[in-house]
Image (tube, grey):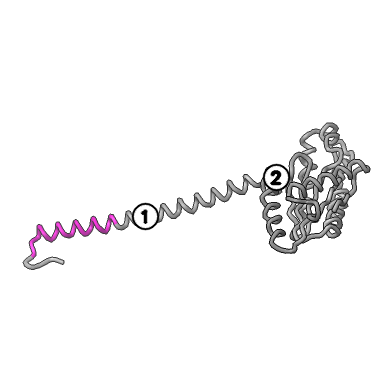
């Protein structure tokens, strides 16, 4: 507000001041917009990094770290109610021979094809993870021993049916040994559940491979 009488000097001084206020307000709005955009970009980048930290780069499956975190969550849910929980340990048979005979590049391709077969065959609630090397872990929430065994057999058959050829045209057989365990009596924590499944896997190996062994 300006009071009369107006002088050109005062009028233009007030006008310049008002112009500066408007300019500062525009700059402040721009800075806020930039901060919001930067915050959004940072959030997206953090989510991407977190996803990368929990994903196996070769197979694009969740990795061992993710598997442990998810299994811990599922274990906690079973503690709150009468919910079943099973898990599988899967191992590609004679994988070292595949690498030694056909090379590591084809070994990596075998891992990717097995991972893809497991992903496609798994049930909606199953969580397929790469455990490390040629081993995979499958978490089966709300699943008892019998249903987990049947799901494991479907996965085993799916991998056995893969037709992978070596560069020289030779057929490269791919099979799985699988150990299945269910949370139950004598299994005090999730590590004990994994160990029980691992024991079942060892039994599958010693019994001739390309089979599923259940130890509930």
**In the image, what residue occupies the spot 86% across and 38% down?**
94
**In the image, what residue occupies the spot 6% across and 66% down?**
5
Q: Pick whichever, 34 or 66, lies toward us.
A: 66
Relative placement, left or right, of 206 versus 128 is right
**Which residue is disc 1 drawn over?**
30
What percent of the width, then of the height, locates residue 69?
Answer: 66, 50
**In the image, what residue occupies the spot 8% across and 68% down?**
4
Q: Between disc 1 and disc 2, whose residue precedes?
A: 1
In which quarter of the view is residue 121 placed?
bottom right
In which quarter of the view is residue 57 placed?
top right
Q: Secondary structure at mark 1?
A: helix
Q: Pick whichever, 1 or 170, lies toward us.
A: 1
Q: Pick whichever, 126 or 77, lies toward us.
A: 77
**Which residue is disc 2 drawn over?**
64
Circle 1 packing at 10 Å, graded few (<14), some (14-19), many (20+), is: few
What percent of the width, then of the height, locates residue 80?
Answer: 69, 61
Does the segment drawn in magenta span residue 191? no
Query: Residue 69 has which mark?
Result: none
Q: Residue lying furthest left in this view?
A: 5
Q: Which residues are magenta?
A: 6-24
Q: Residue lying furthest top in this view?
A: 100
Observer-side mark, 1 or 2, equals 2
Image position of 52 with respect to 122: above or below: above
Does the segment drawn in magenta span residue 15? yes
**In the image, what residue occupies the spot 62% across and 49% down?**
51
Q: Pick whichever, 97 or 150, lies toward us.
A: 150
Figure quadrant of the N terminus: bottom left
Relative placement, left or right, of 129 versus 102 is left
Relative placement, left or right, of 121 versus 68 is right
Q: Secondary structure at mark 2?
A: helix
What percent of the width, then of the height, locates residue 131?
Answer: 74, 44
């Amino acid at each position: 507000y300006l009071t009369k009488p107006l002088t050109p000097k005062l009028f233009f001084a007030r006008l310049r001041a008002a112009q500066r206020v408007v300019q500062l307000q525009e700059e402040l709005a721009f800075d806020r917009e930039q901060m919001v955009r930067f915050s959004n970009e940072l959030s997206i980048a953090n989510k991407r990094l977190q996803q990368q930290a929990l994903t196996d780069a070769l197979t694009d499956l969740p990795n061992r770290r993710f598997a442990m975190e998810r299994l811990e969550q599922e274990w906690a849910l079973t503690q709150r109610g009468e919910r079943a929980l099973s898990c599988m340990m899967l191992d590609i048979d004679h994988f070292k021979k595949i690498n030694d005979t056909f090379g590591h590049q084809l070994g990596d391709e075998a891992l990717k094809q097995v991972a893809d077969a497991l992903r496609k065959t798994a049930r909606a609630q199953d969580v397929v993870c790469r455990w490390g090397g040629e081993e995979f872990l499958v978490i089966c929430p709300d699943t008892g021993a019998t249903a987990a065994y049947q799901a494991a057999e479907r996965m085993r058959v799916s991998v056995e049916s893969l037709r992978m050829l070596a560069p020289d045209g030779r057929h490269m057989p791919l099979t799985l040994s699988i150990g299945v365990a269910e949370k139950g009596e004598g299994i005090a924590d999730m590590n004990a559940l994994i160990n029980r499944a691992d024991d079942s896997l060892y039994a599958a190996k010693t019994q001739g491979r390309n089979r599923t062994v259940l130890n509930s």
